[in-house]
Amino acid sequence: MNNSSKEVLKINKLSSIYSNSSTYVLNGLDLSMNCGDRLALVGSSGCGKSTVAKAVMQLLPKGSACTGEIYLNGKNVLKLDNISMQTIRGKEVGLIFQDPMSRLNPLMTIGDHLVDTFIAHEETSSIHYLVKRAKGLLEKVGIDPLRFNSFPHEFSGGMRQRLAIALAIALNPPLIIADEPTTSLDSIIANQIMSELSLLCDEMGTALLLISHNLSMAYKWCNKIAILDSGQIIESGDIQEIICNPKTDIAQKLVNSGRILEGSERKKIDKRNELLKVNRLRCWHKIGFWPLNSFWIKAVNEVTFSLYQGETLGIVGPSGCGKSTLCRALIGLLPIRGGSIIFGGKNISSLKRKNLKQFRKYIQIVFQDPCACLNPKMSIIDAIIDPILIHDLLSRSQAREKARNLLTLVGLTPTDIYEQRLPSQLSGGQQQRVVIARALALNPKILICDESVSMLDAEIQAEVLELLRSLQDKLKLSMLFITHDLSLAAGFCHRVLVFDNGKIIEENSGRNMLDHPQKYLTKKMVEACPRLPK
């Protein structure tokens, strides 16, 4: 048997159930991988993707039950004790989590993470040699060896993920499992991370199991796909063939959702009704203390644009370019240093307290993480009622009736099922619908969506975007749509602005932006956009 056909992972009839649950997360799952395979494990939230990774690594929560067989290089990990598994982890299989900080110790330096990994697996070499080896590994994943003594909090999200890759490949394992490794990263960094990971796997002959909800990313980086639903593989094979000719309903839904996210160019908007005018807006943050070591971060610097009635304006750019700062400045959550914000013909940039509170009902924001902006102890209906009562717009009984109407509007029906639930009792997509309903409770003119679908799986993303389109048409809303995904913005927005270092560097329609990018950054973003075959 040649190396390319050697089996590195074999899963037979794997079933898994968590403690205090009567439902199997995995139910008779079969899966196999050979050396060099690039397999994407794809499915909607809750289908069991991450549970597969945890089962292989034997990292399921205490009290969970697992039956079946999991062979890693011929060893059935379900029959190994904890000490044996400690040897297996890292040496036989490396795991890259969605959040690299779940793998990193904030009190340990970058170098110590790598050196300790070598030592834990009975490396007998001198410390000098292990340090040299660790620095070489950092260089391989694009981290300057001079950062050897840095701490994780001193790294960006992309740099932390590079470190996570270095830890995963440190012992040259035959298999790497990457569980949503780029979800929180902008498209350029995500592309760099996946490119580096793929290249390293090629160099080492390592198999890659990519767990993702992003079908476009799966297509770009993998040659095989397995679609998971209700704990079972329902369709698998060559990724090109399955995406072009999906056989099951679930596969067809995933492909359709992927195509919806990529979208098509929207009709031009009537530019006679200007709703918002931002003119030479400056939002600077002072770092350090005067007179020593003080300087300004020009997060938003001389930004000028207009938003028209009924328009969706996309704002795209890499992490740290000033997108979110702009959003918060527009609604008065951050002070501005100069420029003006004209809404409805009035300059609202200098509004204070009471007047600012009155203005905020006209511009509402939907944040990235719905769970973080919902009170965990407040029922869904009370969460929607709350801003109505704060602004003293309706009586409690009237507000309750309006909240029920809003729940119906965002598709949470029948309302009596949802209204008394807590946020923790809802899925991510349902939580985001509640946040949208709450934002609409004050009858805003402008809705700001700040990465509002980035944490959702592809199918739910498509549903939320269709909901936003529908609400825009019904309520004549204008929207600012903030995202790091140029492909998504191009399909969903009427116009797209590209941000870099606090400034607008390019403006165009979505389609023209994808087909004819002008600036270097825009070209890099277009190159980084994973897209499904036509």
Image (spheres, grey):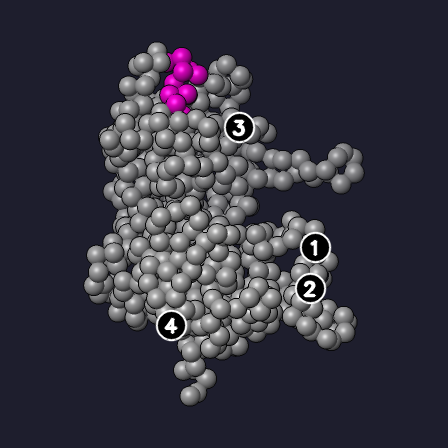
Instruction: Please say whether residue 205 is visible from this viewpoint.
Output: yes
Mark 2 or 3, nearer chain start:
2
Q: Secondary structure at mark 2?
A: helix
Q: Which residue is mark 3?
A: 333
Mark 4 or 1, nearer chain start:
4
Looking at the image, residue 484 lies above or below residue 347: below
Q: Which residue is mark 4?
A: 32
Instruction: Please say whether residue 440 is visible from this viewpoint.
Output: no
Give yes or no for residue 387 being in the magenta stretch: yes
Q: Main secondary structure of the magenta part?
A: helix
Q: Which mark is residue 108?
A: 1
Looking at the rendered structure, the kind of residue marked 1 is Met
Q: In what quadrant of the picture does the N terminus appear?
A: bottom left
Q: Secondary structure at mark 1?
A: loop
Looking at the rendered structure, the kind of residue marked 3 is Leu
Q: Provide the residue span drawn in magenta.
A: 382-393
Mark 3 or 4, nearer chain start:
4
Residue 319 coordinates in the image, percent (x, y): 52, 48
Residue that protrudes farthest toward the right in the picture: 292
Separation of residues labelled 4 and 1 (CA atoms): 36 Å
Separation of residues labelled 4 and 2 (CA atoms): 31 Å
